[in-house]
Image (cartoon, helix red, strand yellow):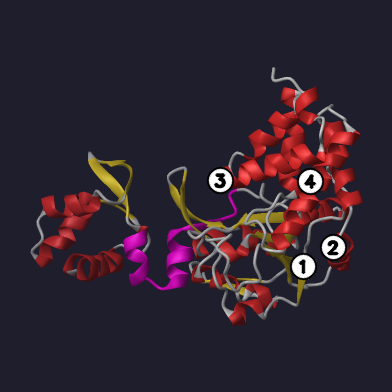
Amino acid sequence: MKFENEIFAEVSNSFPNTSELTVNQVAGIAEKFGVGRQSVYNRLKRFDKVGVQAGQAVFNLEAALVPFRSQTQSAVANVGVSSVSSSEVFVPELDKTFVKWGNFTTIKKIIGSGMFYPTFVTGLSGNGKTFMIEQACAQAGREYVRVQISPETDEDDLIGGFRLIQGETVFQKGPVIKAMEQGAILLIDEIDRGTNKIMALQGVLEGKPVLIKKTGEVVKPAKGFNVIATANTKGKGSEDGRFAAATIIDEAFLERFTITVEQTFPQINTETKILTKHMEKFSCVDEEFATYLVNWADAIRKTYEDDGVDEVISTRRLCHIVQTFSIFKDKMKAVELCINRFDEDTKEAFLDLYSKVDVNAEEEEVDI
Protein backbone atom coordinates (compact mmCIF):
# COMPACT_ATOMS: atom_id res chain seq x y z
CA MET A 1 0.00 0.00 0.00
CA LYS A 2 1.13 3.57 -0.64
CA PHE A 3 0.96 4.39 3.08
CA GLU A 4 3.22 1.53 4.14
CA ASN A 5 5.76 1.95 1.35
CA GLU A 6 6.28 5.63 0.57
CA ILE A 7 5.28 7.20 3.87
CA PHE A 8 7.15 4.80 6.14
CA ALA A 9 10.21 5.06 3.89
CA GLU A 10 10.12 8.85 4.33
CA VAL A 11 9.52 8.50 8.08
CA SER A 12 12.57 6.24 8.32
CA ASN A 13 14.73 8.79 6.50
CA SER A 14 13.42 11.70 8.57
CA PHE A 15 13.81 9.96 11.94
CA PRO A 16 16.80 7.59 11.48
CA ASN A 17 17.60 7.27 15.20
CA THR A 18 14.23 6.38 16.66
CA SER A 19 11.25 4.16 16.03
CA GLU A 20 8.95 5.71 18.65
CA LEU A 21 7.01 8.55 17.05
CA THR A 22 3.96 10.66 17.80
CA VAL A 23 0.91 10.92 15.57
CA ASN A 24 1.84 14.49 14.64
CA GLN A 25 5.37 13.49 13.59
CA VAL A 26 4.06 10.87 11.19
CA ALA A 27 1.15 13.06 10.07
CA GLY A 28 3.55 15.85 9.14
CA ILE A 29 5.17 13.55 6.60
CA ALA A 30 1.95 11.84 5.49
CA GLU A 31 0.46 15.24 4.64
CA LYS A 32 2.93 15.50 1.74
CA PHE A 33 1.32 12.39 0.28
CA GLY A 34 -2.22 13.65 0.69
CA VAL A 35 -2.99 11.49 3.75
CA GLY A 36 -4.87 13.23 6.57
CA ARG A 37 -4.11 13.11 10.31
CA GLN A 38 -7.17 11.01 11.18
CA SER A 39 -6.19 8.40 8.61
CA VAL A 40 -2.67 8.35 10.06
CA TYR A 41 -4.02 7.84 13.57
CA ASN A 42 -6.29 5.00 12.44
CA ARG A 43 -3.31 3.24 10.85
CA LEU A 44 -0.99 3.76 13.83
CA LYS A 45 -3.46 2.27 16.31
CA ARG A 46 -2.40 -1.22 15.22
CA PHE A 47 1.08 -0.60 16.64
CA ASP A 48 2.04 -0.69 20.33
CA LYS A 49 1.36 2.54 22.18
CA VAL A 50 4.43 3.16 24.38
CA GLY A 51 3.67 6.53 25.94
CA VAL A 52 2.47 10.11 25.58
CA GLN A 53 4.55 13.11 24.52
CA ALA A 54 3.23 16.68 24.63
CA GLY A 55 -0.30 15.30 24.74
CA GLN A 56 0.31 13.09 21.71
CA ALA A 57 0.27 9.29 21.73
CA VAL A 58 3.66 7.71 20.99
CA PHE A 59 3.71 4.48 18.96
CA ASN A 60 6.51 1.96 18.46
CA LEU A 61 6.86 1.65 14.67
CA GLU A 62 9.92 -0.62 14.64
CA ALA A 63 8.14 -3.42 12.77
CA ALA A 64 7.11 -1.02 9.99
CA LEU A 65 10.44 0.81 9.71
CA VAL A 66 12.86 -2.14 9.75
CA PRO A 67 12.40 -2.91 6.02
CA PHE A 68 13.54 0.62 5.15
CA ARG A 69 16.67 0.56 7.27
CA SER A 70 19.86 -1.46 6.96
CA GLN A 71 20.10 -4.32 9.42
CA THR A 72 23.12 -2.78 11.11
CA GLN A 73 21.52 0.65 11.45
CA SER A 74 18.29 -0.82 12.75
CA ALA A 75 20.01 -2.97 15.36
CA VAL A 76 22.78 -0.67 16.54
CA ALA A 77 21.26 2.78 16.25
CA ASN A 78 17.66 2.12 17.18
CA VAL A 79 17.50 -0.85 19.53
CA GLY A 80 19.52 -2.56 22.19
CA VAL A 81 20.59 -6.17 22.23
CA SER A 82 19.91 -8.16 25.34
CA SER A 83 19.60 -11.71 26.59
CA VAL A 84 17.08 -10.38 29.13
CA SER A 85 17.34 -13.67 31.05
CA SER A 86 19.45 -16.82 30.87
CA SER A 87 17.17 -18.84 33.10
CA GLU A 88 16.63 -21.28 30.22
CA VAL A 89 20.25 -22.42 30.55
CA PHE A 90 20.88 -24.58 33.62
CA VAL A 91 22.20 -27.88 34.90
CA PRO A 92 19.15 -30.12 35.48
CA GLU A 93 18.67 -31.75 38.87
CA LEU A 94 19.35 -35.43 39.44
CA ASP A 95 16.11 -37.40 39.66
CA LYS A 96 16.07 -40.30 42.12
CA THR A 97 13.48 -42.16 40.04
CA PHE A 98 15.78 -42.34 37.00
CA VAL A 99 17.09 -45.77 36.04
CA LYS A 100 20.02 -46.12 33.64
CA TRP A 101 19.10 -48.27 30.67
CA GLY A 102 19.13 -48.51 26.89
CA ASN A 103 20.96 -45.68 25.15
CA PHE A 104 21.81 -43.75 28.30
CA THR A 105 25.50 -44.71 28.19
CA THR A 106 25.70 -43.68 24.53
CA ILE A 107 24.13 -40.27 25.19
CA LYS A 108 26.27 -39.67 28.27
CA LYS A 109 29.47 -40.44 26.32
CA ILE A 110 28.45 -37.99 23.60
CA ILE A 111 27.72 -35.27 26.14
CA GLY A 112 30.90 -36.03 28.09
CA SER A 113 33.08 -35.83 24.98
CA GLY A 114 32.47 -32.09 24.68
CA MET A 115 32.39 -32.53 20.91
CA PHE A 116 29.93 -30.96 18.52
CA TYR A 117 28.12 -34.14 17.52
CA PRO A 118 24.46 -33.55 16.47
CA THR A 119 22.39 -36.53 17.59
CA PHE A 120 18.87 -37.54 16.56
CA VAL A 121 16.95 -39.71 19.08
CA THR A 122 13.81 -41.42 17.81
CA GLY A 123 11.26 -43.68 19.48
CA LEU A 124 7.62 -44.04 20.51
CA SER A 125 6.11 -41.49 22.87
CA GLY A 126 6.57 -42.09 26.58
CA ASN A 127 9.69 -44.27 26.47
CA GLY A 128 12.03 -41.84 28.22
CA LYS A 129 13.93 -40.09 25.40
CA THR A 130 13.84 -36.58 26.84
CA PHE A 131 14.23 -37.76 30.45
CA MET A 132 17.31 -39.76 29.45
CA ILE A 133 19.02 -36.75 27.86
CA GLU A 134 18.12 -34.51 30.79
CA GLN A 135 19.56 -36.95 33.32
CA ALA A 136 22.68 -37.50 31.22
CA CYS A 137 23.28 -33.74 31.45
CA ALA A 138 22.55 -33.83 35.18
CA GLN A 139 25.06 -36.61 35.83
CA ALA A 140 27.69 -34.94 33.67
CA GLY A 141 27.07 -31.55 35.30
CA ARG A 142 26.39 -30.00 31.91
CA GLU A 143 24.15 -27.02 31.26
CA TYR A 144 21.33 -27.61 28.82
CA VAL A 145 18.52 -25.72 27.13
CA ARG A 146 15.28 -27.48 26.24
CA VAL A 147 13.32 -26.13 23.27
CA GLN A 148 9.84 -27.56 22.68
CA ILE A 149 8.94 -27.58 18.98
CA SER A 150 5.40 -27.02 17.70
CA PRO A 151 3.91 -26.17 14.29
CA GLU A 152 4.06 -22.50 15.32
CA THR A 153 7.76 -22.50 16.21
CA ASP A 154 9.71 -20.10 14.00
CA GLU A 155 13.03 -18.27 13.79
CA ASP A 156 11.87 -15.63 16.26
CA ASP A 157 11.24 -18.33 18.90
CA LEU A 158 14.57 -20.05 18.28
CA ILE A 159 17.10 -17.34 17.38
CA GLY A 160 15.40 -14.35 18.99
CA GLY A 161 13.39 -11.27 18.17
CA PHE A 162 12.48 -7.74 19.14
CA ARG A 163 10.73 -7.29 22.48
CA LEU A 164 9.42 -4.22 24.30
CA ILE A 165 11.20 -4.22 27.67
CA GLN A 166 10.39 -1.39 30.10
CA GLY A 167 9.43 0.93 27.28
CA GLU A 168 12.54 0.19 25.23
CA THR A 169 12.76 -1.99 22.15
CA VAL A 170 15.51 -4.56 22.54
CA PHE A 171 16.49 -7.67 20.67
CA GLN A 172 16.09 -10.63 23.01
CA LYS A 173 18.34 -13.55 22.17
CA GLY A 174 16.53 -16.86 21.82
CA PRO A 175 17.35 -20.17 23.52
CA VAL A 176 19.45 -21.44 20.61
CA ILE A 177 21.78 -18.44 20.73
CA LYS A 178 22.04 -18.66 24.53
CA ALA A 179 23.00 -22.33 24.31
CA MET A 180 25.63 -21.53 21.69
CA GLU A 181 27.14 -18.68 23.70
CA GLN A 182 27.37 -20.74 26.89
CA GLY A 183 28.54 -24.00 25.33
CA ALA A 184 25.45 -25.81 26.55
CA ILE A 185 23.55 -28.84 25.24
CA LEU A 186 20.64 -27.74 23.07
CA LEU A 187 17.81 -30.27 23.45
CA ILE A 188 15.30 -29.85 20.63
CA ASP A 189 12.26 -31.77 21.79
CA GLU A 190 9.85 -33.29 19.25
CA ILE A 191 11.65 -31.79 16.29
CA ASP A 192 9.32 -33.62 13.89
CA ARG A 193 6.45 -31.39 15.06
CA GLY A 194 7.94 -28.35 13.33
CA THR A 195 7.37 -26.87 9.88
CA ASN A 196 9.92 -25.59 7.38
CA LYS A 197 10.31 -22.58 9.69
CA ILE A 198 12.78 -24.57 11.78
CA MET A 199 15.16 -24.54 8.80
CA ALA A 200 16.62 -21.56 10.65
CA LEU A 201 18.48 -24.25 12.61
CA GLN A 202 20.27 -25.65 9.56
CA GLY A 203 23.36 -23.48 10.06
CA VAL A 204 23.33 -24.24 13.78
CA LEU A 205 23.48 -27.98 13.00
CA GLU A 206 26.72 -27.40 11.10
CA GLY A 207 28.46 -26.10 14.20
CA LYS A 208 29.44 -22.91 12.44
CA PRO A 209 29.02 -19.24 13.48
CA VAL A 210 25.46 -18.00 13.02
CA LEU A 211 24.46 -14.58 11.71
CA ILE A 212 21.57 -13.00 13.61
CA LYS A 213 19.91 -11.30 10.66
CA LYS A 214 17.96 -8.83 12.78
CA THR A 215 21.05 -7.37 14.46
CA GLY A 216 23.95 -8.20 12.18
CA GLU A 217 25.75 -9.96 15.06
CA VAL A 218 27.70 -13.14 14.36
CA VAL A 219 27.59 -15.69 17.20
CA LYS A 220 30.26 -18.37 17.42
CA PRO A 221 29.40 -21.59 19.29
CA ALA A 222 31.39 -21.90 22.52
CA LYS A 223 33.32 -25.07 23.30
CA GLY A 224 31.01 -27.85 24.44
CA PHE A 225 27.98 -26.73 22.47
CA ASN A 226 26.02 -29.61 20.96
CA VAL A 227 22.55 -30.35 19.60
CA ILE A 228 20.45 -33.38 20.53
CA ALA A 229 16.96 -33.72 19.02
CA THR A 230 14.12 -36.08 19.92
CA ALA A 231 11.28 -37.27 17.70
CA ASN A 232 8.60 -39.94 17.58
CA THR A 233 9.44 -40.65 13.94
CA LYS A 234 12.57 -40.67 11.79
CA GLY A 235 11.53 -37.49 10.05
CA LYS A 236 9.52 -39.25 7.35
CA GLY A 237 6.07 -38.56 8.80
CA SER A 238 3.75 -41.05 10.47
CA GLU A 239 2.12 -43.44 8.01
CA ASP A 240 -0.07 -45.15 10.62
CA GLY A 241 -1.49 -41.82 11.78
CA ARG A 242 -0.41 -42.32 15.41
CA PHE A 243 1.53 -39.07 15.33
CA ALA A 244 -0.67 -36.92 13.14
CA ALA A 245 1.29 -33.75 13.88
CA ALA A 246 4.59 -35.32 12.80
CA THR A 247 5.88 -33.75 9.61
CA ILE A 248 8.31 -34.86 6.92
CA ILE A 249 11.65 -33.23 7.69
CA ASP A 250 13.80 -31.95 4.84
CA GLU A 251 16.45 -34.53 3.85
CA ALA A 252 19.25 -31.94 3.85
CA PHE A 253 18.24 -30.98 7.40
CA LEU A 254 18.28 -34.60 8.61
CA GLU A 255 21.67 -35.21 7.01
CA ARG A 256 23.22 -32.72 9.39
CA PHE A 257 22.68 -35.10 12.31
CA THR A 258 25.76 -37.29 12.72
CA ILE A 259 23.94 -40.31 14.16
CA THR A 260 20.42 -41.55 14.86
CA VAL A 261 19.72 -43.36 18.13
CA GLU A 262 16.68 -45.64 18.25
CA GLN A 263 15.00 -45.78 21.66
CA THR A 264 12.77 -48.78 22.41
CA PHE A 265 10.82 -49.58 25.56
CA PRO A 266 12.90 -50.98 28.45
CA GLN A 267 13.26 -54.67 29.21
CA ILE A 268 10.89 -56.19 31.79
CA ASN A 269 13.41 -56.18 34.65
CA THR A 270 14.41 -52.59 33.95
CA GLU A 271 10.84 -51.35 33.68
CA THR A 272 9.95 -53.13 36.94
CA LYS A 273 12.79 -51.25 38.61
CA ILE A 274 11.51 -47.96 37.18
CA LEU A 275 8.03 -48.56 38.56
CA THR A 276 9.39 -49.61 41.95
CA LYS A 277 11.30 -46.35 42.20
CA HIS A 278 8.14 -44.41 41.37
CA MET A 279 6.27 -46.37 44.03
CA GLU A 280 8.95 -45.36 46.53
CA LYS A 281 8.54 -41.75 45.44
CA PHE A 282 4.77 -41.87 46.05
CA SER A 283 4.99 -44.09 49.15
CA CYS A 284 2.95 -46.92 47.64
CA VAL A 285 5.42 -49.76 47.17
CA ASP A 286 3.74 -52.94 45.91
CA GLU A 287 6.24 -55.12 44.08
CA GLU A 288 3.57 -57.59 42.97
CA PHE A 289 1.52 -54.77 41.40
CA ALA A 290 4.63 -53.46 39.62
CA THR A 291 5.26 -56.92 38.17
CA TYR A 292 1.66 -57.26 37.00
CA LEU A 293 1.74 -53.84 35.32
CA VAL A 294 4.97 -54.53 33.46
CA ASN A 295 3.79 -57.94 32.22
CA TRP A 296 0.47 -56.43 31.16
CA ALA A 297 2.20 -53.64 29.21
CA ASP A 298 4.63 -56.11 27.63
CA ALA A 299 1.76 -58.29 26.37
CA ILE A 300 0.04 -55.26 24.85
CA ARG A 301 3.24 -54.11 23.13
CA LYS A 302 3.78 -57.53 21.56
CA THR A 303 0.20 -57.52 20.31
CA TYR A 304 0.77 -54.00 18.94
CA GLU A 305 3.88 -55.14 17.06
CA ASP A 306 1.78 -57.90 15.50
CA ASP A 307 -0.86 -55.32 14.45
CA GLY A 308 -3.34 -56.81 16.91
CA VAL A 309 -4.12 -53.46 18.58
CA ASP A 310 -3.71 -49.81 17.56
CA GLU A 311 -2.58 -48.51 20.94
CA VAL A 312 0.31 -49.22 23.26
CA ILE A 313 0.99 -48.74 26.97
CA SER A 314 4.11 -46.60 27.46
CA THR A 315 6.45 -46.51 30.43
CA ARG A 316 5.14 -43.01 31.15
CA ARG A 317 1.58 -44.39 31.25
CA LEU A 318 2.65 -47.05 33.78
CA CYS A 319 4.19 -44.34 35.96
CA HIS A 320 0.90 -42.44 35.76
CA ILE A 321 -0.90 -45.57 36.97
CA VAL A 322 1.49 -45.82 39.93
CA GLN A 323 0.82 -42.20 40.90
CA THR A 324 -2.94 -42.73 40.57
CA PHE A 325 -2.70 -45.87 42.69
CA SER A 326 -0.97 -43.83 45.42
CA ILE A 327 -4.07 -41.61 45.58
CA PHE A 328 -6.93 -44.13 45.33
CA LYS A 329 -5.27 -47.29 46.72
CA ASP A 330 -7.25 -49.25 44.11
CA LYS A 331 -5.41 -51.14 41.36
CA MET A 332 -8.26 -51.53 38.88
CA LYS A 333 -9.41 -47.95 39.36
CA ALA A 334 -5.86 -46.68 38.80
CA VAL A 335 -5.56 -48.70 35.61
CA GLU A 336 -8.98 -47.67 34.35
CA LEU A 337 -8.55 -43.95 35.02
CA CYS A 338 -5.23 -43.94 33.17
CA ILE A 339 -6.53 -45.72 30.06
CA ASN A 340 -9.83 -43.86 29.77
CA ARG A 341 -8.30 -41.77 26.98
CA PHE A 342 -8.44 -44.77 24.62
CA ASP A 343 -11.59 -45.61 22.64
CA GLU A 344 -14.14 -47.82 24.39
CA ASP A 345 -13.22 -51.09 22.64
CA THR A 346 -9.50 -50.64 23.31
CA LYS A 347 -10.13 -49.64 26.90
CA GLU A 348 -12.29 -52.70 27.57
CA ALA A 349 -9.76 -55.00 25.93
CA PHE A 350 -6.92 -53.58 28.04
CA LEU A 351 -8.95 -53.84 31.26
CA ASP A 352 -9.93 -57.42 30.44
CA LEU A 353 -6.29 -58.30 29.81
CA TYR A 354 -5.20 -56.76 33.12
CA SER A 355 -7.87 -58.72 34.99
CA LYS A 356 -6.37 -61.89 33.48
CA VAL A 357 -2.82 -60.89 34.45
CA ASP A 358 -3.85 -59.95 38.01
CA VAL A 359 -6.74 -62.32 38.73
CA ASN A 360 -7.26 -61.02 42.28
CA ALA A 361 -7.34 -57.31 41.46
CA GLU A 362 -11.13 -56.85 41.27
CA GLU A 363 -11.79 -59.09 44.29
CA GLU A 364 -9.24 -57.43 46.57
CA GLU A 365 -9.74 -53.79 45.72
CA VAL A 366 -12.61 -51.68 46.99
CA ASP A 367 -13.57 -48.36 45.43
CA ILE A 368 -13.18 -45.66 48.05
The residue indicated by pointer 2 is: 103
Q: Position of residue 181 (x, y in %)?
A: 69, 63
Report the Cα–Cα distance between label 2 and label 3: 33 Å
Mark 1, mark 3: which one is toward the viewer? 3
- Based on the displayed image, in which of its 4 quarters is residue 308 positioned? bottom right
Image marks 1 and 2: residues in contact by CB distance under 8 Å: yes
Measure the C-alpha gap from mark 2 to mark 4. Answer: 24 Å
Q: Secondary structure at mark 2?
A: loop
Secondary structure, mark 3, is loop
Which of pointers 4 and 3 lies earlier in the amino acid sequence? 4
- Magenta residues, start to end: 63-84
Sequence-wise, the earlier of marks 1 and 2 is: 2
Along the line of sight, the residue nearer the viewer: 211 or 147: 147
Give SS at disc 4. Answer: helix
Quarter containing the C terminus: top right
Question: If you read the primary sequence from the N terminus, does the residue marked by circle 2 or circle 4 appear first?
Answer: 2
| Amino acid of disc 1 | Glu
In the rendered view, does 148 fall on the left or right side of 138? Answer: left
* Neighbour tally class for label 2: few under 14, some 14-19, many 20 plus, Cα within 10 Å: some
Residue beneath disc 4: 296
Give the residue number, with chain letter if any, for mark 1.
262
Q: Label 4 amino acid?
A: Trp
Q: Residue at x 17, y 62 (%)?
A: 29
Overall secondary structure of the magenta section:
helix
Q: How many residues crowd mark 1 within 10 Å: few (<14), some (14–19), many (20+)?
A: some
